[in-house]
Amino acid sequence: VWRQADEYNVPRICFINKMDRVGADFNRTIGMIRSRLKANPIAIQWPIGQESDFEGIVDLLTMEAIVWEDDALGAKPISVPIPDHVREDAEQARQAILDRIIETDEELMARYLEDEEISPEELRAALRQATIRGEVTPVLCGTALRNKGIQILLDAVVHYLPSPSDVPPIEGTNPITGDVETRKPDDDEPLSALVFKIVTDPYVGRLAYFREIGRAHV
């Protein structure tokens, strides 16, 4: 799947799951993303604990700590001060990703060298553009079974992955004329869809399932 995404220039993010399981190792997994997938991961979170001690995460862009109540199954993220036992590691990790994000944007780099303050929103915007260009892969973590980190993951999809307006027009062959045509992500464009499944229903006959790919919404 990763090779296919590389071939078709699909931007992506990573989620390190099961941080509460025996053997969970955030840094080792980051290394495996780099070595096995030949990716350029940027961890935008730092875990608060691992295995049975996993409590939450530190957002390295805002330097805010978030934990979840076990009895609520992660439904209510709670902002808390960064625990002392992870503060030093989180600060070192933030500095490391700060340099890597800023170096993807010449304007931010110039301001950074002038010792100007770079806001979390500006860092997020630069990271988004680098992700869409395929230069970096943001990495988050949590435990899906307990719904810890999933809300933040969904926010990251919005923050860093492309909307229809961020990708080029779809190109395909008109099945009637045989001409090669393009479809922009615009509601005024003609329908263009990909049929991905055909099934036969005893009551209604043959059904075709499709994904709309040529306009701005599904």
Image (cartoon, helix red, strand yellow):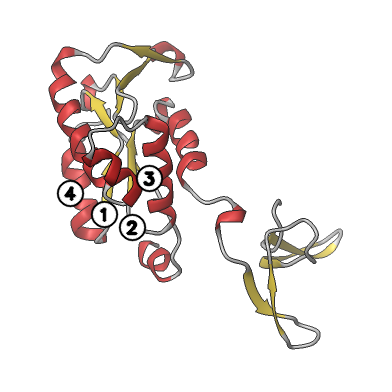
Disc with the residue nearer the chain's start (4 vs 3)? 4
Type of the residue with mark 1: Asn
Q: Residues within 10 Å of mark 1 (few under 14, many from 20)?
A: some
Pointer 4: what residue? 31
Disc with the residue nearer the chain's start (3 vs 1)? 1
Disc with the residue nearer the chain's start (2 vs 1)? 1
Separation of disc 2 and disc 4 at Cα?
Answer: 17 Å
Res 135 label: 2
Pointer 3: what residue? 127
Type of the residue with mark 3: Leu
Q: Residues within 10 Å of mark 2 (few under 14, many from 20)?
A: some
Separation of disc 2 and disc 1 at Cα?
Answer: 7 Å
Disc with the residue nearer the chain's start (2 vs 3)? 3
Pointer 1: what residue? 40
Secondary structure type for disc 2:
loop
Separation of disc 3 and disc 1 at Cα?
Answer: 12 Å
The quarter of the rendered structure image containing the N terminus is bottom left
Tag 4 near tag 1, CB within 8 Å? no
Compared to residue 74, the image places residue 167 above or below, namely below
The residue at the point 39 percent across, 45 percent down is: 126
Question: Of the residues tagged 2 and 4, which is closer to the observer?
Answer: 2
Separation of disc 4 and disc 3 at Cα?
Answer: 20 Å
Question: Of the residues tagged 3 and 1, which is closer to the observer?
Answer: 3
Type of the residue with mark 4: Gly
Disc with the residue nearer the chain's start (4 vs 1)? 4
The residue at the point 21 percent across, 54 percent down is: 34
Type of the residue with mark 2: Glu
Residue 133 sits in quarter: bottom left
The residue at the point 18 percent across, 39 percent down is: 96
Compared to residue 21, the image places residue 169 above or below, namely below
Tag 2 near tag 1, CB within 8 Å? yes
Separation of disc 2 and disc 3 at Cα?
Answer: 9 Å
